[in-house]
Image (cartoon, rainbow, N blue to C red):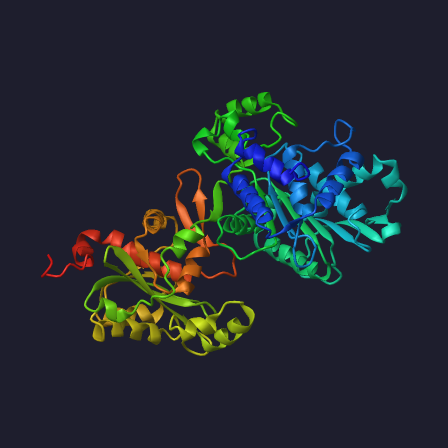
Amino acid sequence: MDNNYVFQYWEAIENGAVTVGKWIRTIYKILVDGLKSGKWDFDGDKANKAINFIENFCHHSEGRNDLLKLELWQKAIVSAIFGIMDKKTGYRQFREVFIVVARKNGKTLFAAAIAAYMTYIDGEYGAKVYFLAPKLDQADLVYDAFYQIVQADDELESITKKRRSDIYIKEFNTSVKKIAFNSKKSDGFNPQMVVNDEMEAWPGDQGLKQYEVMTSALGARKQPLIMSISTAGYINDGIYDELMRRSTSFLKGNSKETRILPFIYMIDNLEAWDTIEELKKSNPNLGVSVSEEFYLEQIEIAKTSLSKKVEFMTKYCNIKQNSSVAWLDYWDVMKAVNEDIKITLEEYRGCYCVGGIDLSRTTDLTAASIVIWKNGKWNVITKFYMPKKRYEIAVNEDNVPYNIYREKGFLEISGENQVDYKDVYKWFIDLVKVYKIRPLKIGYDRYMAGYLIDDLKMAGFQVDDVYQGTNLTPILHQFEGDLKDGKYNLGDNTLLASHLLNVAVEINMNDSRMKPVKIEKRMRIDGAMSVFDALTMVSKYHNEIGKKLLNISKETA
């Protein structure tokens, strides 16, 4: 334990010596449990080698030039990156590091120091280290900090040549370069390390594509590292949001990822944003690199106007105005699943229900759900539809067992290149004609209605459109609460369960309203949205249909 700063930091968290938020507590619980159980190995020599290099070779570059002395939280991060090993390969376990920390906590110098270790000591001959930003001048911050570290040490400088376009170490055939976005070109990238600075400012789709380019280029190295450092920001649906959703999904236990390592320093209690104790959660260097007096002054300024408060919350509390995080806990969802018990329509013969439909574009899934109250629970039956051409690709490329879901009856092939909505129509017709199950209302996504809705209306179904935005906030709150209370039964439909686990929520910090979104763009949430459409009908028309939905027979009434 004396040789492991991951354990030391966890002990400090547990005994209250340091104050951290829920996400930091969670990641260290995961790391400590994984090391204690033998899931991963720990190489204390490699972890301490990195720490010793930073503290003996890396100097401060602004306002002072003494050697960098890492705080416990920084030593723990370095130890986690360089000391936790894959048991099978013996190489580093984690390849994607995401560090979210408030302004003035030394993250630029910290990133530059880690990059220096990767450049000079890590041992990869012919390494390529990149500092990446949307524009070259934006990449200068960490790149310049890196070069100032080199210049401040005679030994490092003696083997280093500053060239026009890069920094070159001939002895290792290693180059260090700052680059700007060029997501169309990935040829030539073979990075040992990529440092992404201030990712909150990376523009939406362009940033997502560039990140994908760099991560896909990591495959040629044995233990590469892509490190993203950021504060919270203002850009929505960019790479910051996606990494935040992926990270929180991993932290909640919803993700199958094994290579991502998130350190998210942010406050928990929004009401206590103006207290030093809460600010410690987003500012681990509080009292070290920045004094309490500074934050107290900034708090008073923030109280003078809404815009200044928003800026303070974003930059010092690490709370985005529209925060985007994973939503449901894995075990809450899986509590509603029983893979040994299949829900059949026959079980609900003669019942009233509500329906929901999430209609697809050409390549997406279409999902149709009915929700039935019976035996003290909301019982959910969901049917998925996918066009044949998309299915053939998905089975081979999506790493999702659609063939198994098809065998179990959750998924039906429909149409060639796009879903034939007549199959969805037939499903609802059969509910009524074959099983006497009567949907009192059917909700649907207003943006993809198509002719299906007209056909359902002609057949006598009562349908209503649903705007899938922040208006769903009360539905989401109710669903989450009922799920935690064990009031949902999904049967053995693990495809629906996966869609629920793929849901993240964007939370507006002004009014706490929530909007459901995907954790990643490639993930599917169609099944979840069809359930929310159905539940909207319960809420909106409760006075009209509430009694019938209880499914109380005349005999028991």
In the figure, is residue 421 to the left or right of 304?
Answer: left
* Of the pair 10 and 538, the residue shown nearer to us: 10
Quarter holding the N terminus is: top right
Whether 255 is drawn above or below 462: the answer is above
* Of the pair 338 and 506, the residue shown nearer to us: 338
Residue 149 position in % (x across, y down): 79, 37
Q: Is residue 140 visible?
A: no
Q: Is residue 552 visible?
A: yes
In the figure, is residue 163 to the left or right of 267?
Answer: right
Whether 130 is drawn above or below 25: the answer is below
Residue drawn at (53%, 34%), measured in percent from left and top? 14
Location of residue 380 (image quadrant): bottom left
- The residue sitting at the bottom extreme is 416
Quarter holding the C terminus is: bottom left
Residue 177 position in % (x across, y down): 77, 49
Residue 463 position in % (x across, y down): 26, 63
In the figure, is residue 447 to the left or right of 10?
Answer: left
Residue drawn at (24%, 68%), measured in percent from left and top? 347
Residue 320 position in % (x across, y down): 51, 40
Whether 362 is drawn above or below 179: the answer is below
* Of the pair 237 and 38, the residue shown nearer to us: 38
Residue drawn at (18%, 51%), measured in percent from left and top? 543
Q: How many marks?
A: 0
